[in-house]
Amino acid sequence: MSEKKKILMVDDEVHIREIMKEYMTIGDFQLTEAGDGLEAIKLLETQTYDLIILDVMMPKLDGWSTLREIRKKGKQPVIMLTARGEEYDKLLGFELGVDDYVVKPFSPRELLARMKAVIARTQVEVSTSNAQIVFEPLVLDADARTIEISGTRLSLTPKEYELLQFLMQNPKIAFSREQLLTSVWGYDFYGDDRTVDTHIKMVREHMGDLRNWIVTVWGVGYKFDPVVIEK
């Protein structure tokens, strides 16, 4: 029997936690509950989780503030629950390293499907001990989940890392925004494809002088096309 995935659900609405607890006991999940952000942070001091489900609107400490504290300690996968669907909220969340969004009211089955997709994406085992992708001076270390340029580590959010990793794994291939959403986010994204444009912009900013290695293919999308840097 496979080990149950540890889930931390942070939501001040008790009935939502109770409903999801019933669904999760049927599947391969072990649920820990927290009624607010402060309680969640205390739990995270002594425990790690395969996935955190985090409500935005909570007393004492809201979801955004809680997420910032979580990201100070690590990069555990996070799904945000929100009653709002504004683009600003989604972009803020992605910048802070949110892996997925579910808008309230939601179907428990949909949330379970999203949970499984996020866990599958973030817990892919690397088959080699020092798996690297190298396009000098750009180096990706899959074991450490780091990307460096000339020895300087890029400060990427989890989704920025996954996007650049996917492009580096498939150099010189043009992908549409829809293909990038499906390949990097791992499901049919419920929103518009400007999410890809926003993340491409942020990754380019991190890459500095190598920003032109991510090429806009007009009428299609984007591709990773490294060029030789003369020394």
Image (spheres, helix red, strand yellow):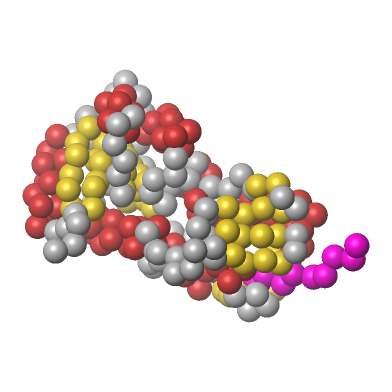
Residue 227 is a magenta residue? yes
Q: Is residue 92 left or right of residue 202?
A: left
Q: Residue at x 19, y 57 (%)?
A: 3
Q: Position of residue 222 (x, y in %)?
A: 64, 70
Question: Does the magenta run of residues contain 74?
Answer: no
Image quadrant occupied by the C terminus: bottom right
Q: Residue at x 48, y 33 (%)?
A: 72
Q: Could you say which is closer to the camera, residue 113 or residue 45?
A: 45
> Where does the N terminus fall, quadrant-wise?
bottom left
Which residue is pictured at 50% across the width and 73% down the height?
A: 179
Whole-percent x and y of residue 125? 40, 64
**Residue 231 sits above or below residue 105 on the image:** below
Q: Tell whether 112 sits left or right of 204.
A: left
Q: Residue furthest front?
A: 129
Residue extending farthest to the top is 60
> Can see residue 127?
yes
In the image, residue 46 above or below residue 16: above
The picture places residue 122, in percent across and down from the top left corner, at 40, 58
Report the magenta stretch's main SS.
Answer: loop
Bounds of the magenta span? Answer: 222-231
Residue 57 in view here: no
Residue beneath the point at 33% across and 58% down = 119
Where residue 211 sits, quadrant-wise, is bottom right
Q: Is residue 204 left or right of residue 175?
A: right
Between 175 and 117, the residue placed more toward the observer is 117
Residue 164 percent location from the top left of the image: 59, 61
Nearer to me, 43 or 175: 43
